[in-house]
Amino acid sequence: ALIALRPLLDHAAAHDYGIPAFNINNMEQIQAIMQAAAETDSPVILQASAGARGYAGAAFLRKMVEAAVEQWPDIPICLHQDHGASPAVCQQAIRNGFTSVMMDGSLLEDMKTPASYDYNLTVTRRVVDMAHAVGVSVEGELGCLGSLETGEAGEEDGVGATGILAHGQMLTDPEQAADFVAITGVDALAVAIGTSHGAWKFSRPPTGDILDIDRIAAIHRRLPNTHLVMHGSSSVPQEWLRIIREHGGDIGETYGVPVEAIVAGIRHGVRKINIDTDLRLAMSGAIRRLADTDRCEFDPRKFFKAARDAAAGICRERFEAFGCAGQA
Ligand code: G3H
Ligand code: 13P
Ligand code: NA
Ligand code: ZN
């Protein structure tokens, strides 16, 4: 059944696990996530960005998710809008049947310019009023991750006492987080604790202290009833990078967030873990490999199936590593 984010994350908090929130853009990604969830008996968060709505259209996204609900009636599914740029965007998503919305007021509507704290409070509060009136959950964001547009990364050694990382990342302040939740009433809060969007997170193999776990713990202590969200949580699997390079791709040395670091975050209140890049790498890698090794193939279903199987493999691993398996 389709359910809101709040009850899914309440269950995750009560049972100490985290739920991967995978980005969806097409049928194969939805099927990959659902297949893996069915095999591991996991609850599901499907999230669609503005880019996904531009690619597939809100109607197709809704209908494909309805199909998933019909095919897997026993798996709880949350349909979440990722990075809403304004209250109007969130309102539209609610009309389109989303059961959860993210109001990303950490940035202005251009989704580039860091916003003032007052702006963030105002737009997020407005969305909470609107969404809660109809049973839809809300995720807010406080702090700034690396750029959504370029995926430009923070540097792992850039964490300073001021909470500002290299490349302008602004880490979440625990006191301000408590104030933000008290005023807005969000169900879930995305925090900036060292991750960034896209494939270019870290230029060197990450060490054990790659995330600011103390900061996550401090935020969680002040907000024990608010579910923390980690964006930019792809692990950038080195085996898929190798396959991409072996079959004609050109992606330079880069590293993501180790699964063990995410699991440490889950121990301190992280309940929703956003993953998009890993599915992109696995799917495009599988397509490259098939195109390269079976040069006579031209049935697109063969390519899409290889991509779907590769994505399902990532999903299974994350459902298991985050303790989500067996919880549906
Ligand atoms: O956080 C951003 C997600 O990776 C979605 O990316 O805007 O290209 O769909 P997108
Ligand atoms: P990645 O780019 O690390 O996959 O993060 C995705 C994300 O945060 C979507 O909101
Ligand atoms: Na989101
Ligand atoms: Zn994000």
Image (cartoon, helix red, strand yellow):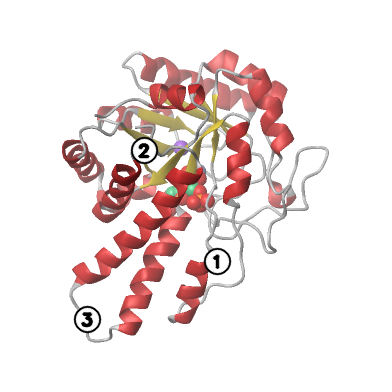
- Point 37% across, 28% down: residue: 100
- Point 77% across, 45% down: residue: 159
The numbered mark, 3 or 1, whose residue comes first in the sequence reads 1
Label 2 element class? loop
| Of residues 59 and 254, the one drawn nearer to the viewer in this rendering | 254
The image quarter in which residue 262 lies: top right
Label 1 element class? helix
Distance from the alpha carbon under mark 3 to that under mark 1: 27 Å
Instruction: Tell us which disc is closer to us: 3 or 2.
Output: 2
Instruction: Tell us which disc is closer to us: 1 or 2.
Output: 2
- Point 43% across, 44% down: residue: 319
Residue 8: x and y in percent read 40, 26
Residue type, numbered disc 2: Ser
| Of residues 21 and 199, the one drawn nearer to the viewer in this rendering | 21
State the quadrant of the N terminus: top left
State the quadrant of the C terminus: top left
Whether residue 272 sits left or right of residue 212 in the image: it is left
Residue 71: x and y in percent read 17, 41
Which residue is under mark 1? 238
Which residue is under mark 3? 297
Residue type, numbered disc 3: Glu
The numbered mark, 3 or 2, whose residue comes first in the sequence reads 2
Residue 232: x and y in percent read 55, 47
Label 3 element class? loop
Which residue is under mark 2? 42
Residue furthest bottom in the image? 296
| Of residues 61 and 69, the one drawn nearer to the viewer in this rendering | 69
Find out whether the residues at labels 3 and 1 contact each other: C-beta distance under 8 Å.
no
The numbered mark, 1 or 2, whose residue comes first in the sequence reads 2
Q: Residues within 10 Å of mark 2 (few under 14, many from 20)?
A: many
Residue type, numbered disc 1: Gln
